Structure formats: C-alpha cells, structure tokens
Image (spheres, rainbow, N blue to C red):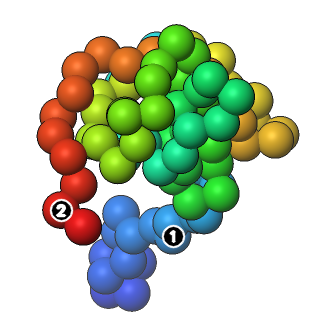
Amino acid sequence: MSRLSALFEGVGFRTNRPTFEPGEELAAFVTGYEDGQALVRIGDTVLRIDDTTPDLVDTQIRLRVEEFDDNDHVGRATVLDTIGDSSF
C-alpha cells in the first residue's frame, strides 16, 4: 500500500441525498409537518412519519425507516422514542 492510499484509507465523501435501508434506525430532528405527517429532512432526503402531531416539530427523535425509494430519496419511518427538543 502506498503512502497516499494509506493516507486516504477510509476517507469518503458525504452526500446531500443519503439513502437508507428498511429497518435502519437513526436519530434526527423533525423539521416540518405537512398533511398529517411529520417530516424529517436529512440533506435533500425526506422521511415522512404518519400519525403524529404538529408539536413534534423541532424535536429530536429516534426513528426506524420502514420504506425507502432510492430513486426519489423519500421514505416512510416510525417514531421509536423522543430524545429532546432543539436548542434553537
């Protein structure tokens, strides 16, 4: 292995359109509420959460991805737990 490849080992680039697998769990902030669904935006990716109330906006939650469309970067998720409110 060259020194250059050793230097860049494990280095990757972040994307503004992350993808998720069904069953994946993560923490994120609820950024909006539309048509009876909470919206979680991670970059340009949007996860929708059914059966929520508008007071969940600006709250950090743990969620599980239920469905995800890699082409459109949209999906559906379920709230597992509330972590806390935002600091802004």
The percent position of residue 44, horizontal first and vertical second, equals 65, 57
Q: CA distance from mark 1 to mark 2?
A: 28 Å
Residue shown at 65% from the left, 36% from the top: 34
Q: 16 left or right of 86?
A: right
Disc 1: which residue: 13
Label 1: how many Cα within 10 Å (few below 14, some 14–19, many 20+): few
Is residue 44 among what the camera can see?
Answer: yes
Query: Residue 33's spot in the image, x, y percent?
Result: 56, 38
As drawn, 53 above or below 33: above
Question: Which quadrant of the figure has residue 28?
Answer: top left
The extreme bottom residue here reads 4
In this view, the residue in front, 7 or 38, is 38
Residue at position x 23%, y 55% from top? 86
The reply to whether residue 26 is visible in this rendering is no
Q: Which residue is mark 2?
A: 87
Q: Secondary structure at mark 2?
A: loop
Left/right of residue 49 with respect to residue 57 in the rendered view: right
Mark 1 or mark 2, whichever is nearer to me:
2
The residue at 23%/20% (across/down) is: 81
Residue at 16% in and 40% down: 84
Say which of 41 and 37 sits in front.
37
Disc 1 or 2, which lies upstream in sequence? Answer: 1
Q: Amino acid at mark 1?
A: Phe
Which image quadrant: the N terminus?
A: bottom left
